[in-house]
Image (cartoon, helix red, strand yellow):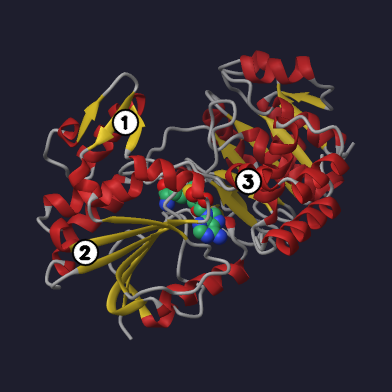
Amino acid sequence: MISDNDIDLILNDLHEIYGYDFNYYSRASLKRRINRLYSLDKFLSINEFRSKIISDKNYIKRFIEEITVNVTEMFRDSSFYKELRTRILPVLGTHPFIRIWHAGCSTGEEVYSMAILLQEAGLLHKSLLYATDINPGVLEKAQSGIFPLSHMKQYSENYIASGGLQDFSSYYTANYDGVKFKPELQKKMIFSTHNLVSDSSFNEFHLIICRNVLIYFDKELQERVFNLFDESLANLSYLALGSKETLKFSGIQHKYKQVDREKIWRKIK
Amino acid sequence: MNYSCKILAIGGSAGSLEVLLKVLPHLKEEISFSIIIVLHRKNSSDSALSDLFSTRTKIPVYEVEDKQSIVPGNIYIAPADYHLLIEKNISFSLDFSEKVNYSRPSIDVTFESAADVFNTDLICLLLSGANMDGSNGLKVAKENGAVTLVQDPETADSKIMPSIAIKNNEIDHILTPDQIVTFINSINV
Ligand SMILES: C[S@@+](CC[C@H](N)C(=O)[O-])C[C@H]1O[C@@H](n2cnc3c(N)ncnc32)[C@H](O)[C@@H]1O
């Protein structure tokens, strides 16, 4: 087991040499991920691990990919997507154009789900979906639009539970073990790396979706990211979080009102 | 012999809910430690489990929210579909990483994380289940000085999980549901 002290040293190296600041990540999860990588890559000593991190730029890519948690699904939490469908999209539809930011989009399942919702609401043509993540590896996958065939049964069930009425398989073409989602869904997506720790606001949005990213941050960093989102949201626009995340204890909460039962807030001031 | 702790961590899978529903009504209403419960379940309706437990005990029951502080005297339940981790500042973090032992929440993950923070101030109890989860968590807990308890497989609906834990580890006490009640009521007294 890597000691807390060694974790501190590794985090310092990463920050000083590569500019990645993981100091404000929730430590328990980070420690678990770093230990997992250490045994996965069969290092023999902490020193060997540290010098690999310090000297091998290519290894950093792997490090970031493995330390961050990339698990995601299409239409995960169907009741959340149902509320987007019934409560949020009808309001967004009144705008001449719609800008949406998926912060921490991972391999993109959430973004394709959103594009399907927009298309079914007849809004995709006037929407732009900015999809960002700290990890360039997951963005490449997102951009490919190719997902494992084995997941489609679950996704199709999620889609139907979210109020979807189409045949889910009409949105992709199936190959041997992967499916490729229709290019028309992708046309309005813009993929880019963006680090919520260190990068600033880059546009004003009508809806920001950041789900299951903040659970990896400590309270202080959560607060900083909430402020970043607040700067990036126009009045009367929306912020959506993961099902176990909340705006309730943050400094910006007085400017926001929860829409209904899901973790979606509207900026009212 | 009486034990002391800050945290009693309980893990269970198939057949463990019945045990907890039997044990909870007999626990003292005021406890000087916290109880953390990790149960395998379908990602069914979230609050159902904490509501159910609340009908069996006067101890306050919470379904954990991210970054919630751990306060003595309460029962905390791992939410469905997230791993439950514990921070050095005595608060919870949730984690949506890969399943461990086909499970999320995984008992191993919580036991190991609790062991890292609470060391000898921890008691871990593993209940009925048809899975391998929990065994490694008990091992790590023991290495860090915690007390380890397992439900007597003879009294378990599914014997696999407690049996594997007993086979792979040196367990401090193997207890029937009645003995579990007596044990918990004697903590910190
Ligand atoms: C568990 S995934 C969430 C995926 C999706 N939003 C969902 O809820 O299914 C967390 C994502 O956050 C990303 N992430 C972690 N730290 C980040 C940071 N500092 N800036 C941007 N993204 C980050 C990870 O790379 C990962 O893809």
Q: Residue at x 43, y 55 (%)?
A: A211
Circle 1 SS class: helix
* Distance from the alpha carbon under mark 1 to that under mark 2: 25 Å
Residue A86 relative to residue B107: left or right: left
The tally of labels here is: 3
* Residue A269, horizontal then vertical, whole percent: 33, 86
Task: Name the one closer to the observer, A72 or B152.
Answer: A72
User: Which disc is residue A154 wearing?
Assistant: 1
Q: Residue furthest left?
A: A122
Q: Residues within 10 Å of mark 3 (few under 14, many from 20)?
A: some
Q: Residues within 10 Å of mark 1 (few under 14, many from 20)?
A: few
Instruction: Identify the amino acid type marked 1.
Output: Gln
Label located before the other in sequence (1 or 3): 3
Residue B95 relative to residue A2: left or right: left
Marks 1,2: beta carbons within 8 A: no
Chain holding disc 3:
A
Q: Residue at x 78, y 53 (%)?
A: A10
The residue that disc 3 covers is A67
* Residue A54, horizontal then vertical, whole percent: 78, 51
Q: Is mark 2 within 8 Å of ligand 1?
A: no
* Residue B4, horizontal then vertical, whole percent: 84, 47
Task: Name the one closer to the observer, A92 or B58.
Answer: A92
User: Which disc is residue A94 wearing?
Assistant: none
- Answer above or below: position of A145 versus B153: below
Chain holding disc 2:
A
Q: Residues within 10 Å of mark 2 (few under 14, many from 20)?
A: some
